[in-house]
Amino acid sequence: MKILLISLGVILGVLLLLEGSLRLIFGLGQRPLYIADPKIGYLLAPNQNIRRLGKSTIINQYSMRTEDIKPHREGNSLRLFLLGDSIANGAWWTDQKETISALMTEDLQNILSEKVEVLNASANSWGPRNQLAYLQGFGTFEAQRVILLMNTDDLFATAPISLVVGKDPNYPDHQPFSAIGEILERLFVRRQPIPGMAELLAEKGDRVGINLQALEQIKAITTQNNSQFIIALTPLKHEVEREPKDYEKRARERLKEWTETHGVVFLDFLPIFKQQQNPLDLYRDHIHLSPLGNQLVSQNISQLIRINN
């Protein structure tokens, strides 16, 4: 009996040591959480401050990847509003200080005399209709410029979907029981198909046209709020390696024509990326950017802001 108790004590001690190490060193057991929204689809739960795998993630009271802000802009400050998906958000693998919005803030603050704020409303896999719904729900926060950071895939984005929240492991709505439990969940819990998801992802019709209509509504909101609307488009990795596919070229051309018709400033990063000596170094994977890619994007958007300021 004594040996059994000693063995149990040793096992418990090892588990507690492992749990503590996983939490303190890797930040496991605490992950960014999402909430469902009937119009936006989903957004990051407000008021989160997480350090995970060495990276800091701060989500403010408006579900932005930005520190807490005041709803009204200070009279002598420059407030920019960055909208986007996982590229703008940076996800868990990007430290708060290395997000595009944080880099823009640093770039512009070093040059401009007034206070600079770059708000960042974004979430993984958001498309134009998610971003439109966010603006309709929260407004522009008196930003002088609204910058929509898109990638080519966003032109084909589906309508906002909330089914993933709490069902897809990439969109958790609660914390795991423990850090060890999170690892076991990832290793052994089989991902089941979400009922209804396949139908929603197979949305028919002219998706590019529908998303351009969403951009038109975003443009109307920015105009009503005395903001300048800017669109920046990053390419997929294969577009830089080779060429965009025919359907991607057509979608890109439609977007460019739309911006010209509606007087929207358009920054296309495809030629900028191709001009780099090692353009593939700008990518983390087939779509997401590396720290070098984030720096290049932030520098070019900041330069555009300076020119138009």
Image (cartoon, rainbow, N blue to C red):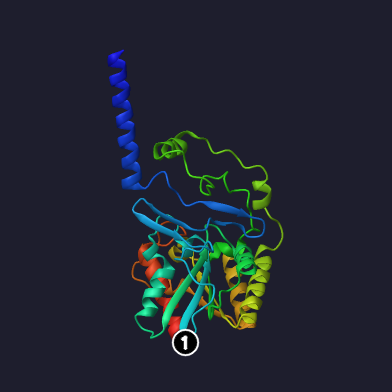
Q: Nearer the viewer, residue 25 or 163?
A: 25
Whether 1 is drawn above or below 237: the answer is: above
> How many neighbours does mark 1 have within 10 angstroms: few (below 14), some (14-19), or many (20 or more)?
few
Q: Nearer the viewer, residue 17 or 254?
A: 17
Locate the N terminus by quadrant: top left
Q: Is residue 279 visible?
A: no
Q: Amino acid at mark 1?
A: Asn
Query: Helix, strand or loop at disc 1?
Result: loop
Q: Name the residue at the top extreme.
A: 1
Q: Is residue 54 visible?
A: yes
Residue at which label 1 appears? 309
Q: Is residue 180 left or right of residue 233?
A: left
Whether 38 is drawn above or below 250: the answer is: above
Image x and y of residue 195, in percent: 66, 42
Image x and y of residue 218, in percent: 63, 73
- Residue plotted at (64% across, 58% down): 158
Image x and y of residue 90, in percent: 44, 60
Q: Nearer the viewer, residue 163 or 249?
A: 163
Image x and y of residue 109, in percent: 37, 79
User: Total marks drawn?
Assistant: 1
Q: Nearer the viewer, residue 123 or 116?
A: 116
- Residue plotted at (34% across, 80% down): 110
Whether 217 is drawn above or below 191: the answer is: below
